[in-house]
Amino acid sequence: ADIERHEAAYGRVPSGAWVLMRTDWSKRRDPEAYQNFDETGQHTPGPSAEAVLFMVQQRDVRAHCEIFFHQARPALLPATRGLFAVEFDWEEFRRRWNVLASDGDEVRHLLSDGVRLAIEQLWRHPLPGEMTVSISPNCLVVRKIWNSARGIDIEEFVERACMLSDQVHLA
């Protein structure tokens, strides 16, 4: 509904566009407010799985890929309906990550050494933790269970996410 309202006001999201979201989450200086826990767990801003699927399935996207840490909790896992396991030879990467895609050949091309390295750097910063990455030619979404209340860590994480975006674009 939010995407459709945006498109009604500004026009259809063009094919090949990058969709970015500014949340100002880093302005939360209080560690408790930054972590944003309640009885159901941690909550951070980001598009819903439905919104990501809408952008991928209802717009001109060639392939869609979900990469998620093997031990990620169910609330963090992406929607994987219609996606299939991708076979690849990167043993160390495979030990940590599940890779599902709508088109395995397209995703093997997309997951260059630079993309895999950028994913690993995101995962390690500020500390290794549960993380998912949704990649398509039009959209990149990173979700991570956050383990730091320091504002500088989120800024560095965003810079690393931008580097991942650059690597995906180059691939």
Image (cartoon, rainbow, N blue to C red):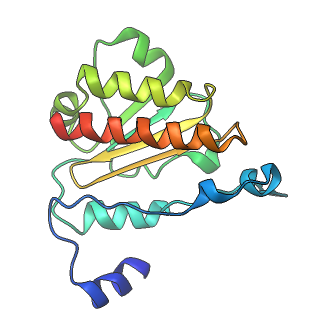
The image quadrant where one finds the N terminus is bottom left
Measured as percent of width and height from the top left, residue 11 is found at: 21, 84
Measured as percent of width and height from the top left, residue 20 is found at: 36, 60
The residue closer to the viewer here, 114 or 23, is: 23
Please tell me whether residue 164 is drawn above or below residue 35 in the rendered image.
Answer: above
How many marks can you see?
0
Which residue is found at the position 41% from the left and 17% from the top? 93
Please tell me whether residue 57 is drawn above or below residue 64 in the rendered image.
Answer: below
Which residue is found at the position 33% from the left and 13% from the top? 90
Which residue is found at the position 15% from the left and 51% from the top? 62
The residue closer to the viewer here, 114 or 101, is: 114
Q: Is residue 143 left or right of residue 170?
A: right
Q: Is residue 24 left or right of residue 81?
A: right
Measured as percent of width and height from the top left, residue 157 is found at: 51, 38
Measured as percent of width and height from the top left, residue 169 is found at: 19, 41
- Judged from this view, the residue extending furthest toward the right is 39
The image quadrant where one finds the C terminus is top left
Please tell me whether residue 43 is drawn above or below residue 112 in the rendered image.
Answer: below
The residue closer to the viewer here, 170 or 155, is: 155
